[in-house]
Image (cartoon, helix red, strand yellow):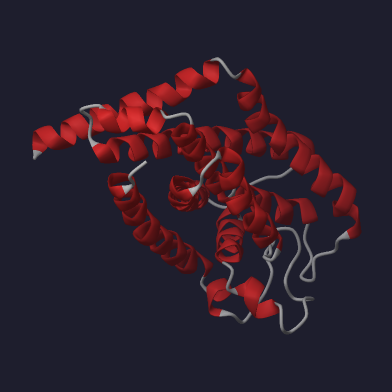
Amino acid sequence: MYETLRWTLNDSLTIAGRTYSRLKAQPGEIAGFLVFPVIMTVLFGYVFGSAITLPGGGDYRDYLMPGIFMQVMAMTATSAATTVAEDMARGITDRFRAQPIARSAVLVGRSVAALSLHLLSLSAMVLTGVLLAGWRAHGSLGATAGAFGLLALFGFAMIWMGTYIGLWAKSGGQADAATFGWLMPMTFLANTFVPTEGLPAWLKPVTDWNPMSAVAAATRGLFGNPTSVSSAWPLQHPVAASLIWSLAILAVFLPLSVHRYRTMSR
């Protein structure tokens, strides 16, 4: 048992290292991770920010930044799906499957590498928020660490959702369409950029129970930033709701992904 776990861990780290090595040859991909935060902060913070007033008061940019942090971690699903599908289309996955390595190590290694890259992007976004938007975390050190931990857990869960979608896709483009096409609208059907108080009555329950609203609200509360008010349970208890949503996504898509990887025929 110990030897199995040790080899699985070693194989996972090797697969993660392969991802980092591939990025050395594609610096543009790393630049994309770092430039995106700047674009989002400038676009929403300065173009739309001056026209938005929070119902409960407070600085809009302090409200905005945790929402963008959440959006970055949610989009991990798209990059994970695309990477997995492209590796399958190029036959790299088949080569991994033919090697004497732990089957779960391939997926675990990829997910760990993907999470670390998105945490790098999140770090760039935090720096951008501090320098360009004047964003600050006003919570305690423990609460701030808890907010980043919650974002990492949510991102890790979304990576496994994307991995499962990628294992069914025929190409990287198909995987991108199968995730980005619904994921991006879902980040807007939440309290990511504006509070949900002014939404139509038929739409408000959708946004209040959107997992992304819970994660954004939880991090705003932990960072000590302005947050919206709602009577919906997920937004009354956003930290608990975020943990439940993230663990539920993991509980569903991690075993499904491993099962799909072990049983797929191509």
Residue 116 visible in image: no
The foreground one among 106 and 43 is 106
Residue 86 location in percent, x, y? Answer: 51, 34
**Which quarter of the figure has residue 196?**
bottom right
Would residue 113 appear left or right of 27 to someone viewing this image? left
**Residue at the bottom extreme?**
201
Residue at x 75% of width, y 76% of height: 197
Residue 265 location in percent, x, y? Answer: 33, 44
The foreground one among 142 and 86 is 86
**Residue at the front extreme?**
266
**Which quarter of the figure has residue 1?**
top left
Residue at x 79% of width, y 56% of height: 60
Residue 123 location in percent, x, y? Answer: 59, 35
The foreground one among 233 and 107 is 107
Would residue 26 appear left or right of 196 to someone viewing this image? left
The foreground one among 244 and 98 is 98
Would residue 259 appear left or right of 47 to someone viewing this image? left
**Residue at the top extreme?**
25
**Which quarter of the figure has residue 182?**
bottom right
Residue 141 location in percent, x, y? Answer: 50, 46
Residue at x 63% of width, y 32% of height: 33
